[in-house]
Image (cartoon, rainbow, N blue to C red):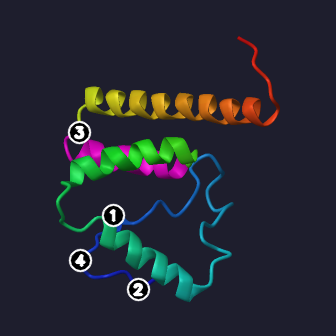
Amino acid sequence: MNRKTDQSSEDAPTPSHPNEPAGRIESYSMLAPRMKRIYFDFYAETYKESRLDRKTKELIAISASLTAKCQGCLEGHIKKALKLGVTKEEISETIAIAMGVNAAAVVDVTDIAAANLNLKHY
């Protein structure tokens, strides 16, 4: 894999699924090598120094991993966040925000369904 030289292996997305037996699932196995390189280049670019510091980016990634239901992503980003000094309280708050957004999403889709079906229960 041709990752940029300024990207450490710690920065790369988790290449396997931790809930599966070792060697059983190979991530990105159905993605053409060219597209895989494009993806990893994009991924590396998003973690470069910018207006957001790395800890903030990892907290955002934890929240996004939760809402996307990506177990491997979640575990990888929690590990990276802890290495960067993120506290358990910061992770907890991040989880609570993701919970709030997901709860609002449930309300949103049910409101849309109710409107489409001309339903009003309460």
Decide: few, some or many residues near mark 2? Use Cα within 10 Å; few <14, some 14-19, many ≥20.
few
Residue at 48% over, 76% down? 39
Of 36 and 51, nearer the camera is: 51
Query: Where is mark 1, residue-wise?
Result: 11
Specify the farthest residue to the top. 122
Q: Amino acid at mark 1?
A: Asp
Q: Amino acid at mark 3?
A: Val
Ranked by sequence position, the earlier of labels 1 and 2 is 2
Q: Is residue 66 above or below residue 25?
A: above
- Residue 79 appearing in the image: no
Q: In terms of secondary structure, where does tag 3 sit?
A: loop
Ranked by sequence position, the earlier of labels 4 and 1 is 4
In which quadrant will I find the C terminus? top right
Q: Amino acid at mark 4?
A: Asp
Classify residue 112 as left or right of residue 89: right
Query: Where is mark 2, residue-wise?
Result: 2
Is residue 87 covered in magenta? no
Alpha-carbon distance for marks 4 and 1? 10 Å
At which x and y percent is residue 59? 32, 44
Alpha-carbon distance for marks 4 and 3? 22 Å
Do the numbered discs 1 and 2 sit on residues whose CB atoms are within 8 Å?
no
Decide: few, some or many residues near mark 4? Use Cα within 10 Å; few <14, some 14-19, many ≥20.
few
Is residue 75 covered in magenta? yes
Q: Quadrant of residue 52?
A: bottom left
Decide: few, some or many residues near mark 3? Use Cα within 10 Å; few <14, some 14-19, many ≥20.
some
Q: In terms of secondary structure, where does tag 1 sit?
A: helix
Classify residue 32 as left or right of residue 7: right
Boundaries of the magenta span: 71-85
Query: Where is mark 4, residue-wise?
Result: 6
Query: Where is mark 3, residue-wise?
Result: 86
Classify residue 82 as left or right of residue 108: left
Q: Quadrant of residue 23?
A: bottom right
